Image (cartoon, rainbow, N blue to C red):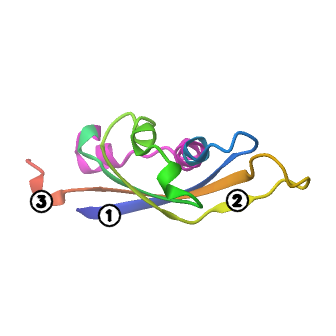
């Protein structure tokens, strides 16, 4: 795969303690600020996109990778979950922390399979 683009995003779950929701918001942050027209530029179908999503949260096992894949309308999505992001405790010391998730989203194509 030839990597052509990397985008970054940050998302939060302020009160519910939902690592998946924070990660989804980070993905949306990366996607919604950009218009990615790489498929058209290189003559590929959008479904040919190879998307690698690296997600950093304090509890990677609490993230539903399938829910993150559903955010993408097309492409082949690989999700890598790792420890990162931040958990910020409540000032009063009770309840769920504020969760911050960070993502790096890489987009590329298998350039060798292009049929002209």
Q: Position of residue 54 (x, y in %)?
A: 45, 59
Number of the label disc, if any, that sits on residue 112: 3
Q: Is residue 54 magenta?
A: no
Q: Give the residue at the far front of this rendering.
A: 94
Q: Is residue 84 above or below residue 34?
A: below
Secondary element at image label 1: strand
Q: Which residue is mark 1?
A: 3
Callout 3–callout 2 Cβ contact below 8 Å = no
Q: Is residue 28 magenta?
A: yes
Callout 3–callout 1 Cβ contact below 8 Å = no
Q: CA distance from mark 3 to mark 2?
A: 42 Å
Q: Give the residue at the far left of this rendering.
A: 115
Secondary element at image label 2: strand
State the image quarter where residue 57 is shown: bottom right
Q: Nearer the viewer, mark 3 or mark 2?
A: 2
Q: Which residue is mark 2?
A: 87
Residue at (31% x, 57% y) in the render: 108
Q: Position of residue 4 (x, y in %)?
A: 35, 61
Q: CA distance from mark 2 to mark 1?
A: 31 Å
Q: Is residue 87 above or below residue 40?
A: below
Range of residues picked out in magenta: 24-46
Q: Is residue 89 rendered to the left or right of residue 110?
A: right
């Amino acid at each position: 795969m030839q990597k052509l683009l990397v985008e970054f995003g940050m998302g939060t779950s302020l009160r519910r303690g939902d690592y998946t929701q924070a990660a989804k918001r980070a993905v949306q942050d990366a996607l919604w600020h950009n218009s990615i027209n790489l498929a058209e530029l290189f003559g590929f179908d959008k479904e040919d996109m190879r998307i690698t999503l690296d997600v950093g949260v304090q509890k990677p096992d609490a993230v539903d990778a399938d829910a993150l894949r559903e955010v993408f309308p097309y492409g082949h999505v690989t999700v890598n979950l790792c420890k990162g992001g931040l958990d910020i405790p409540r000032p009063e010391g009770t309840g769920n922390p504020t969760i911050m998730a960070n993502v790096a989203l890489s987009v590329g194509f298998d350039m060798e399979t292009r049929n002209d």
